[in-house]
Amino acid sequence: MSSIRINLDELAAAYNSALPKFDPEEQRISIQVYRLLAKGRPVSRESLAESLNYHINKVNAILDNWFGVYFDDDKNIIGYWGLALQEMPHRFEVEGKTLYTWCAWDSLFIPELIRKAAHVVSTDPISKDKIRLTVTPDGIAELNPPGAVMSHVKPEATIIDENVIQGFCHYIFFFTSAETGSKWTSQHKNTSVISIEDAFLLAKRKNKFQYPKFITTA
């Protein structure tokens, strides 16, 4: 399989329908969580509120009402919608700090939100070979091997609400080739492969949908 064509509009609509929609204030808090967490340390509620010049009660009310946020015993944020401090399969290095993403696709949309490039290392579940890429806010700067692809699954909002990692992220991986990707997706219902380039375009659409106040590019 030399090329993978998808209906990007259809897939973007399916993804967006399953994602939480933020009001302008929530958009600001959400992006700030990513940017603080990308520094490689747990994020306290107090530091988040101070960085935004918000009252702590406002931050607490919003965080306590969100799913997809993970805390340590001191209620500091250690994981948020795709980005984690704890070790996971996809390594995500930003300015010398090693973090991790829940799934392959997270590493494609987070750089635009934190406005920094990331060096990503992942493992093909079939061949066990490494995939390495550098993702900037504007595109894929490096990809090795060049023919790498990504799996995807059509999301369902109810499943994502119940457990976004189990119901969605466990189906999104990088593969060294369309051949290994297709072998894996043939064994997993409702999954298929997508080129890294299209996956990045899908990530851009996702960001624009969730953060229209901050993302203005097409």
Image: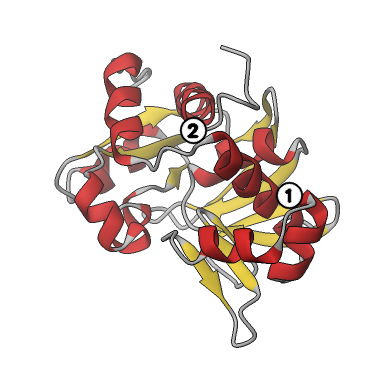
Residue 28 sits above or below residue 44 on the image: above
Q: Residue at x 49, y 33 (%)?
A: 210
Instruction: Label 2, secondary structure: give it.
Output: helix
Instruction: Label 1, secondary structure: give it.
Output: helix
Residue 86 sits above or below residue 192 on the image: below
> Quarter holding the N terminus?
top left
Specify the amino acid type for callout 1: Arg
- Residue highlighted by disc 2: 210
Residue toward you, 48 or 126: 48
Q: Residue at x 26, y 19 (%)?
A: 10
Q: Position of residue 60 (x, y in %)?
A: 58, 66
**Which label's residue is closer to the chain start, 2 or 1?**
1
Mark 2 is surrounded, within 10 Å at the Cα level, by few (under 14), some (14 to 19) or many (20 or more) other residues, namely many
Q: Residue furthest top?
A: 218
Q: Relative to 22, is 7 on the left or the right?
A: left
Q: Residue furthest bottom?
A: 73
Q: Residue at x 69, y 68 (%)?
A: 45
Residue 210 sits above or below residue 54 on the image: above
Residue toward you, 135 or 3: 135
> Quarter holding the C terminus?
top right
Specify the amino acid type for callout 2: Gln
Q: Which mark is residue 35?
A: 1
Query: Label 2 vs label 1: CA separation?
Result: 16 Å
Q: Relative to 206, is 143 on the left or the right?
A: right
Colour scheme of the rendered structure: secondary structure
Q: Position of residue 58 (x, y in %)?
A: 61, 59
Let me know if residue 5 appears in the view: no
Q: Are marks 2 and 1 in contact (CB under 8 Å)?
A: no
Q: Residue at x 48, y 23 (%)?
A: 205
Let me know if residue 127 appears in the view: yes
Q: Position of residue 168 (x, y in %)?
A: 31, 52
**In which quadrant of the rendered view does residue 37 lie?**
bottom right
